Image: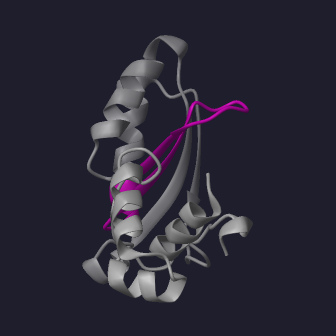
């Protein structure tokens, strides 16, 4: 990827609500070039335009990363279930003894515990670990060094 592309993506990562005009002024890249780059990268490099949310201000006071290991014959079914479950914010297929890492967002710890009980009943979870997220210290800020 060209340096100009990385520079543009770095600006989008910092604040995707900036106008192309603002980015053009700061980077000295013509606005028409930025527009073309935005269109060419959407759907490939740029997967989604989104906002970071403070869920506690919406009443969701329990966030947790959940490591799950299921029986081999249940793995695909569990993955499909987690993909569409409304409480799952992020889902990753992982290795090193577990099948999935899911970030769940719940109103209360009791809701999370009920969710985990449901998973045990429906999918015969072999192993699980729950790590409660106390505070975000850094979130969605990675930019390749060559783009800074």
| Relative vertical location of residue 116 with respect to residue 132 in this rendering, above or below | above
**Rendered position, 55 above or below 21:** above
Q: Name the residue at 73% across, 68% down.
A: 145
Q: Residue at x 50, y 28 (%)?
A: 125
Left or right side of 3 for 58: left
- Magenta segment includes 81: no
Image position of 59 (left or right of 54): left
Percent x, y of residue 92: 52, 41
In this view, the residue in front, 89 or 61, is 89
Residue 105 on the magenta segment: yes
Residue 44, can we see it?
Answer: yes
State the residue in front, 70 or 109. Answer: 70
Q: Which is nearer the eye, 12 or 134?
A: 12
Give residue 110's position: percent from left, percent from top: 36, 60
Specify the color scheme: one colour
Give the magenta part as a residue range.
Answer: 90-112
Query: Which residue is found at the position 35% from the left and 78% from the top?
Result: 20
């Amino acid at each position: 990827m060209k340096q100009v592309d990385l520079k543009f993506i770095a600006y989008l990562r910092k604040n995707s609500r900036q106008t192309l005009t603002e980015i053009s002024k700061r980077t000295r890249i013509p606005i028409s070039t930025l527009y073309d780059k935005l269109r060419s990268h959407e759907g490939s490099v740029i997967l989604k335009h989104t906002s970071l949310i403070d869920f506690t201000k919406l009443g969701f006071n329990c966030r947790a990363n959940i490591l799950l290991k299921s029986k081999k014959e249940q793995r695909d079914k569990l993955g499909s279930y987690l993909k569409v479950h409304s409480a799952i914010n992020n889902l990753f297929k992982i290795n090193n003894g577990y099948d999935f890492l899911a970030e769940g967002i719940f109103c209360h710890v009791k809701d999370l515990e009920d969710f985990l009980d449901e998973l045990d009943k429906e999918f015969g979870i072999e192993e699980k670990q729950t790590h409660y997220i106390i505070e975000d210290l850094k979130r969605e800020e990675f930019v390749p060094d060559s783009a800074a």
